Amino acid sequence: MADNHGNTPAAWTAVLIGLLGFVVGGVGVSLSPINYVLFWVGAGLLVAAAVAFFVMAKMGLHESGH
């Protein structure tokens, strides 16, 4: 395993965006009737989390700060 165990700016940013995506998507599914716009916005945020992680990792923000 890596020394940083995910404690990097890239990892934290991806986790926060992904968490927001799950919350937004979950609210959309919980509404009656289901709000598909919110659901797809949440799904889009999950994709954005992955993109943000890979871009930030390429910028060197997924390296250990030791």
Image: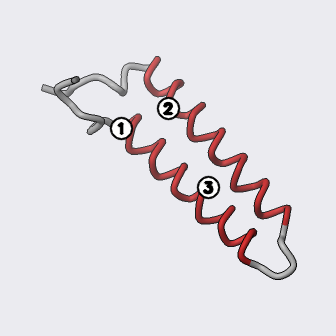
Separation of marks 2 and 3 at Cα, in angstroms: 14 Å
Indicate the quadrant where residue 64 lies: top left
Residue at 54% of width from left, 49% of height from top?
Answer: 18
Q: Describe the element under mark 1 as helix, strand or loop.
A: helix
Place of residue 28 in the rendered image (x, y in percent of width and height, measured from the top left):
75, 69
Classify residue 33 as left or right of residue 2: right
Amino acid on which the number 2 mark rests in the picture: Phe
Disc on the earlier residue, 2 or 3: 3
Which residue in the protein does label 1 denote? 9
Which residue in the protein does label 3 denote? 21
Amino acid on which the number 3 mark rests in the picture: Gly
Residue at 69% of width from left, 62% of height from top?
Answer: 25
Classify residue 20 as left or right of residue 12: right
Indicate the quadrant where residue 59 lies: top left
Q: Are marks 1 and 2 in contact (CB under 8 Å)?
A: no
Indicate the quadrant where residue 2 lies: top left
Disc on the earlier residue, 1 or 3: 1
Residue at 47% of width from left, 52% of height from top?
Answer: 16
Place of residue 29 in the rendered image (x, y in percent of width and height, measured from the top left):
74, 69
Tell me the number on the disc at residue 53.
2
